[in-house]
Each structure stands twice: as C-alpha cells, then as structure tokens.
C-alpha cells in the first residue's frame, strides 16, 4: 500500500497528487511518482524516494538560484584565475596562514596587509592596475620591515625581487 503524500510539503514543493510509478529498480521495487507544485509556481514530478530524502526540494529553482548567487559573488572583479589575483592570495597567505611556507618571514614577524586591501581585494586590484602592474612583475615592499600597503609597495621584475631575499641579503652582508 502506498502512503498518500497529497498535501504534504517537502522543501519548496507541495504534493498535489499521485501521477504514476517509476520503473522497477535493481531491487525490483517501484516508487510512486507525485505531481508537485513549487513555491516559484513551476510544476514537477518527483518519486517518493526523492521526496523523502533529506534535502532542499524544489523544481530545480533552488539549484539555479544557488548557482546564480555563486556566480554573482565570484565575478565581482573579473580576475578569477589571473596572476594578479594569485599575487593577492599569496600575499594574504604569507601574512595570515601559519602553514604557509613563507609565514615565518612575514606574518610571524608581524607583517600584515593594510585593512583597505585585506577587506577588499578589489581595492588591491585597482591599486595594482593603477600603479604599473603587469604579469612579468612582482610586488615588493619598499621598507622590508613595513606592511603591505599602498605607500610601501611597488611592482618590480622578479630578478630584482630575488636579490631582496633574506638569504641573499645575508650573503651580501657577510661578503662586505
């Protein structure tokens, strides 16, 4: 005997009536198919098993809404996957992620990212693009003991940045 689900709510779906059966599955079982109306106004057909499983049930509008929200949140700067965004993420990681290989030379020493950039990556991107950023450059702190902030940063070629590494600076000091 099939339990009547008519009138019951499952997430955004309200069951209107039984509307057939599924084909037999590998266990030789069949489920009732139910005609449902979604809160968004669409109609859909769902089987008993799907309706009774935990989850947010809808005609598909919840998944579309979720995808739309994800897209809106991710495409705020249009830089996803870019080298510049990679520079931003690496800078943040060096300063705030204790497991970062470079954390000891940055975050542990108290070097931070200014609030303006830390709280709004678009501010960093705008600053970088208006201060000479190109894909063949890397960010440098003018005062090596200073923070990442607009007044203390510039863009330089990697070959110059390499000269600033602590190991190279220590070697130059020893040679003198």
Image (cartoon, rainbow, N blue to C red):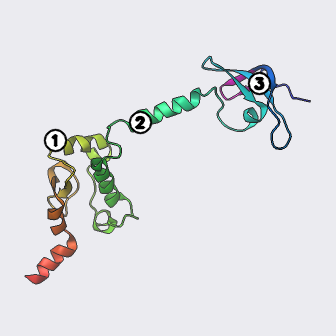
| Residue 13, position as x, y percentages in the image | 68, 24
Residue 135 position in % (x across, y down): 22, 50
In whole angstroms, how far apart are the C-alphas of marks 3 and 1? Answer: 58 Å
Does 119 sit left or right of 159 as displayed?
right
Q: Quadrant of residue 101?
A: bottom left
Element assignment for label 1: helix
Tell me which label, 2 or 3, sits earlier in the chain.
3
Residue occupying image coordinates x 35% and y 35%: 76
Earlier along the polypeptide chain: callout 3 or callout 1? 3
Q: Position of residue 109 (x, y in %)?
A: 28, 66
**What's the CA distance linking mark 2 and mark 3?**
35 Å
Q: Which numbered disc flags the more N-terminal residue, 2 or 1?
A: 2
Query: Which is more foreground, mark 3 or mark 1?
Result: 3
The one nearer the camera, 106 or 3, is: 3
Quick one: which residue is furthest to the top in this view?
Answer: 41
User: Relative to the observer, which residue lies in front, 133 or 147?
Assistant: 133
Mark 3 lies on a secondary structure that is: strand
| Image quarter hosting the N terminus | top right
Q: Is 94 drawn above or below residue 163 in the view shown?
A: above
Report whether 26 appears left or right of 72. Answer: right
Per the image, the residue denoted by label 3 is 34
In this orientation, does residue 164 appear? no
Q: Is-magenta flag for residue 153? A: no
Tell me if 40 is positioned left or right of 85 in this view: right
User: Vertically, is 121 above or below 161?
Assistant: above
User: Quadrant of the image for the C terminus?
Assistant: bottom left
The span picked out in magenta is 9-15
Name the residue tied to disc 2: 73
For label 1, the residue is 130
Q: Quadrant of residue 8?
A: top right
């Amino acid at each position: 005997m099939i339990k009547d689900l008519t009138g019951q709510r499952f997430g955004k779906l309200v069951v209107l009536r039984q509307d057939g059966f599924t084909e037999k599955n590998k266990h030789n079982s069949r489920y009732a198919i139910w005609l449902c109306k979604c809160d968004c106004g669409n109609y859909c057909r769902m089987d008993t098993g799907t309706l009774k499983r935990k989850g947010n049930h809808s005609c598909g509008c919840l998944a579309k809404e979720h995808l739309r929200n994800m897209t809106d949140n991710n495409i705020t700067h249009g830089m996803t996957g870019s080298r510049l965004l990679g520079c931003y993420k690496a800078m943040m990681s060096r300063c705030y992620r204790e497991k970062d290989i470079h954390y000891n030379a940055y975050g542990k020493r108290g070097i931070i990212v200014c609030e303006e950039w830390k709280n709004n990556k678009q501010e960093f991107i705008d600053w970088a693009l208006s201060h000479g950023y190109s894909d063949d450059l890397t960010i440098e702190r003018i005062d090596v003991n200073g923070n990442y902030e607009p007044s203390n940063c510039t863009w330089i070629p990697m070959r110059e940045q390499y000269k600033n590494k602590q190991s190279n600076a220590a070697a130059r000091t020893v040679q003198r």
